[in-house]
Amino acid sequence: MKRLISLLLLLAIVLASAGCGAPAQAPAENAPAAVEEPAAESAESAPAQEPDDVPEDEAEAPAAEEAPETATLVVYFSATGTTRSVAEQIAALTGAGLFEIVPAEPYTAEDLNYGDHSTRATVEQNDPDARPEIANEISLEGCTTLYLGYPIWWGDSPRILSTFVESHDFTGITVIPFCTSGSSGPGRTGEALGELAGTGTFLTSTRLRRGMSDAELQEWIESRG
Ligand SMILES: Cc1cc2nc3c(=O)[nH]c(=O)nc-3n(C[C@H](O)[C@H](O)[C@H](O)COP(=O)(O)O)c2cc1C
């Protein structure tokens, strides 16, 4: 009888420990389920976000194409680097494309010697019909705002600017002229370039200086917009 009781007790212990095993495993099974549930939730919410994301992506791509880098351009001529420096700063501040008007025949230091009136730059400036050739090309397609920079030569814009404005169609473009100089102001150079171009809206030119602070230049940019 004692043996039978002991046997029954042993059986009860074995059964009890087998019963504890199941719940011990159950959380292990539930654990991944618990991990999966939020995953399933995020999977559910993901498709809800995807339609938002996709049109956004799709909307961004054509927008980038519709607003090409060329929408705003900084075009400049610079014989000794002063106007280039200002042009680069404007391009950096506006995110505009940058284009340098390169003369087919580069100006040498002697060409630029305005102490001698027989040198090239001065001879060109004395001839309103001079049109120095440009070596490179730019398309203004898609451009709506164009900053146009040049040095002042004998109170005027260099004749190569005349070549440039006469060889492009500025229809639909606001041209914002700027210049650098030893001390002279821009005079009517902006308006005169507009008259030569015959298309586009040419604003009055502004004399800018190399080494202007970004804040100063930004203020000027905003004043032209
Ligand atoms: C042929 C020539 C004529 C110039 N005439 C003038 C002028 O009339 N007034 C002036 O203030 N500076 C004059 N300058 C100086 C330039 O306008 C000035 O150095 C300018 O910032 C140079 O710009 P760049 O380095 O972009 O070529 C003249 C320079 C040259 C080469």
Image: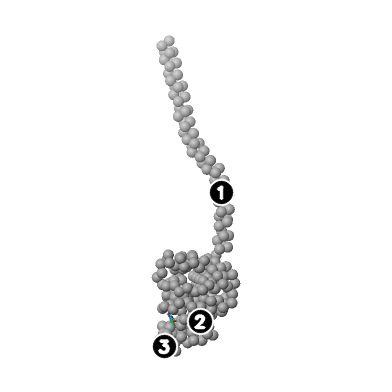
Residue under numbered circle 3: 116
Q: Which is more toward the observer, 19 or 79?
A: 79
28 lies above or below 10: below
Kindly identify the residue that appears in the image at 47 percent across and 24 percent down.
19
Rendering coords of residue 131 (x, y %): 53, 83
Quadrant of ligand 1: it is bottom left
Tell me which amino acid carries mark 1. Answer: Glu
Q: Which is more toward the observer, 5 or 213?
A: 213
Task: Kindly tell me whether residue 39 is visible in this rendering.
Answer: yes
The local crowd at label 1, few if under 14, some if 14 to 19, many if 20 or more residues have their Cα within 10 Å, is few
Number of numbered labels in the structure image: 3
6 lies above or below 222: above
Mark positioned earlier in the residue sequence (3 or 1): 1
> What's the CA distance linking mark 3 and mark 1?
70 Å
Kindly identify the residue that appears in the image at 48 percent across and 80 percent down.
156
Kindly identify the residue that appears in the image at 54 percent across and 85 percent down.
129
Lateral position of residue 193 relative to residue 5, left or right: right
Rendering coords of residue 99 (x, y %): 50, 72
User: Which element type, helix, strand or loop, lies under badge 2?
Assistant: helix
Q: Report the colour scheme.
A: one colour
Residue under numbered circle 2: 159
Rendering coords of residue 62 (x, y %): 58, 60
Mark positioned earlier in the residue sequence (2 or 3): 3
Residue under numbered circle 1: 50
Mark positioned earlier in the residue sequence (2 or 1): 1
Query: Disc 2 vs disc 1: which is toward the camera?
Result: 2
Tell me which amino acid carries mark 3. Answer: Asp
Tell me which amino acid carries mark 2. Answer: Arg
Kindly identify the residue that appears in the image at 41 percent across and 11 percent down.
2
